[in-house]
Image: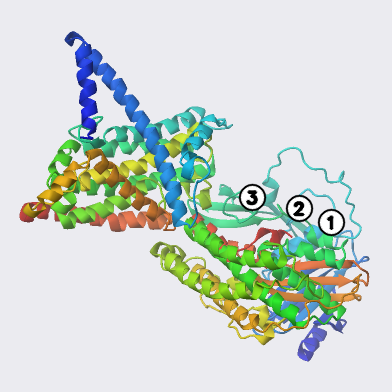
Amino acid sequence: MLELIGIRDWIHNSLTELISEDCSWVVSLIEYVLIGVAFLAVYAVLALILIYVERKVCAFFQCRLGPNRVGPWGLMQSIADMFKILLKEIIRINNTDQFLFKVAPFIVLVGSFCTFGALHFAKGIHGVDFNVGIFYILAISSLGVVGILLAGWASNNKYTLIGAMRCGAQLVSYELSAGLSLLTMVMLAGSMQLSEIINVQEKSWLLFQAPIPALIAFVIYLIAGHAETNRGPFDLPEAESELTAGYHTEYSGIQFGFFYLAEYLNMFIIAAIAATVFLGGWQPLQINAEWAEDFNNVMNYIPTWLWFFGKTFALVFLSLWVRWTFPRLRIDQLLKLEWKILMPISLFNMLLMAVWIIWIK
Amino acid sequence: MEKIKKLILSIVPDAVAEEAQYPTFTVDASKIRSVAEKLKEKGFDYLICLTGMDYGDSLGCIYHISSSTDKTSVIVLKTSTSDRQNPAIPSVHDIWASANLYEREVYDFFGITFIDHPDMRRLFLRQDWNGYPFRKDYDANPELNPVPMENQTIAEMENMPSITLKSDGTVIKKENALFEKGDYVVNIGPQHPATHGVLHLRVSLDGEIIKKVDPNFGYIHRGIEKMCESMTYPQMLHLTDRLDYLSGTMNRHAMCLCVEKAMGLEVPQRAQYVRCIFDELTRIASHLLGWGCMCMDMGSITAFIYGMRDREKIMDIFEETGGGRLMVNYSVIGGLAEDVHPNFVNRVKEFIPYMRKMIKEYHILFTGNPIAKGRMKDIGFLSKETAVSLGVTGPSGRASGFACDVRKIEPYAAYDKVQFEEVIREKGGTFDRYIIRLDEIEQSLRIIEQLIDKLPDDGFRAKVPAIIKLPAGEYYQRVENARGDFGVYIKSDGGKNPYRVKFRSPCMTLISALDPLCQKEKIADLIMIGASLDYVIPCADR
């Protein structure tokens, strides 16, 4: 079997065999470090892949070829870009709040990385599994907005300040819809723990367990999540045409790289959460009927990590599709969409879900 | 015209009337306001162009005035003052709003102060510039105006000096503040992805709401008009392409027509047809770019690339025939530089159905998009009166209901031989300015379709003397370029260089429309409204 859980168990078993039982804390320590390194590596590699995917997909939408010079099909382009961004000078700007200016990119990155750590990538492959997992994800992913506000404020630039303020307004607003639609699904799943939510979907994904309210919640979550990643048509905080680059206008080199990294990973994280909560995470597609047994077996044979990444990248593609098709909203339209449309629908949908659970399920 | 003549003579008995290309009246500077007011009452509400002039012993202004109702009638007013130390002419900015910037330009280059003008800042040059460069006695010594090596504040841009003349002859000098105290002022440009060139906008904001927009010109001013004074006529042609580089062919066409008219040259029909086709292709290319930029400013980069992709087809046609892509350098005095490429006709014929198909795609991609609709709905309205008064012409003027198509008013080249519609919309909103460009592309295709099969065979260039000298006099030629009413004014003293050249730029008036359009709108809309006007900065800056 191609499951990653085998590797995990193999590492754990060989470490416990090597080290005597009195020192089990050493085993834990080594494992923590290994997991940390693995997560960091996956985080960075995913960002590179996402940047490449975005550039290629965008190019095909726009009748272009995209990167095609560095390596075959331009595959090494992202890596070259990474080295470029690492080597670039970090420009020190006068009249800025140096401490906040330097801290801001880290806060954004930490917020996104901590959320990343809570994801379940495959059967048995996850960093932490709190019993309030969804709550934790919602809380920690909001941390990024602090970093963005700090970046905009500390840059001492009018464009960045406008960008940061827009971003604050946008993220705080869309957090509500995203949270409400996730809570709707928590009601259905009956647990906040991510592993529990995934287990509930063994027979059938949550999206199919309560089709109408779950579908509404899914669409709302995709819109709100897309808005939370600050990408078009919701890219007002960095609206290139008005604000040059919004809150990260003044950043250069790896500091800018951090924002860039966090932005792409946030796109992945939103897609991953949607895949986990609505589409069963790493659970394969199952049809709950007797005639479909062979089909289910075939589906079960596909490794779980492939399921997870397949679903997530399908949603990422959806997000790219939207981004490269739609023009940008204006700030008042953006807030109107949230407070007058998405929020009331989410609240109503929660009620609908309650009714569904009590009478129909 | 007789009526106008009588009217002007009744106000100013000693006015000198001439019958030149347009009826011309020379009036005394002190009477210019009363004449202007009367003309405005009689329907002359569109100030085409205001040209400053150094006559040697005196300094003066030339007003080309037309009407939005009786479009074919153009009259020329002239006035001058013999005081070269402190020249002053009454301002007409409150009669024709477009005079606001025109008078600042004249002040900048000729030093003529306009009395009662609220904003006598220099328009293009730095506020501390010494001398007035368009005067014939200007000293161009670089030591007088050294390149500043230190950062300068733009605070001086915020004081607007003005001069008021009281009835007893006393002069009152005043400084008006541009912005109120405590305004949150954002500089947009000169380096900014969305100003479509090096335009500098000072925008005062109330949150995200715009209170005032103050355009600051001159970052790409090359003094083309002054350069022309030391050039021969064939040399000047190359500079015209560099005014509004997106409608270079048409600007060049205007200059050729003006010189040919002055020489009394008969241009072969073939050349006229091909010039028209080139003009319309350029118009399509320009509108495609304008459309794409507007979409990009709303955040839809895909649409921009679609526009660029189809524009590329036109550039290829140009390259094959003219050699150049953006600057085709194709029209010359007397006709065309070369005959068209053998493939030209076929490629243009292939392009027409392709473009029609693509316009449908644009509508699917962008026009029908709910976000795009929401963005363009109910913002940036320009009434017809304001458009006429500000001299907003071209697609932007026609979107407000101002029928100002020079191809219809004063048909030139082969435009009187083709059927096409002057697309006019009534509302003057941002969406009208958006959609009118796509509709004009259709009309341009129609014109090309009618001309391309009928290219006559009478040679591509007339015989032109080796040294071109224009007879002494003044010549004015209007042409519809992609942004509006483009004009070339040449004053010749009979030599091989012109005495004075003036280009009527449609873009400067478009930029002056930003302030009335954007007030009370959001900052995100400023960029989009600017894009909907589709100005090109080198055209305004010249």
Residues at marks 3 and 2 touching, judged by CB atoms closer than 8 Å? no
Q: Is residue B383 visible?
A: no
Which residue of the protein is positioned furthest toward the bottom in this rendering?
B2
Q: Position of residue A316 (x, y in %)?
A: 34, 48
Residue A336 sits above or below residue B499 on the image: above
Q: CA distance from mark 1 to mark 2?
A: 10 Å
**Left or right: where does residue A315 sit relative to residue B164?**
left
Q: Amino acid at mark 2?
A: Leu
Mark 3 near mark 1, Cβ–Cβ under 8 Å? no
Name the element at disc 3: loop
Residues tagged 1 and 2 counted as in contact (Cβ below 8 A): yes
Identify which residue, B23 or B166, lies in the foreground: B23
Which comes sooner in the sequence, label 1 or label 2? 2
Residue B110, placed above or below residue A280: below
- Disc 3 crowd rating (10 Å Cα; few below 14, some 14-19, many 20+) is some
Q: Give the residue at mark 1.
A: B133
Q: How many marks?
A: 3
Q: Please, which chain is the residue tagged with disc 3 on?
A: B
Which of the two discs, 3 and 2, labels the residue nearer the N terminus? 2
Q: Residue, x 37% and y 45% (percent of image)?
A: A229
Percent of width and height locating residue A258: 44, 34
Identify residue for label 3: B190
Observer-side mark, 3 or 1, equals: 3
Question: In the displayed structure, does residue B142 sit left or right of residue A137?
Answer: right
In the image, what residue type sits under mark 1?
Pro
Viewer-closest of B541 and A291: A291
Residue A29, percent across and down?
Answer: 27, 17
Q: Could you tell me the amino acid type at mark 3?
A: Pro
Residue under circle 2? Answer: B125
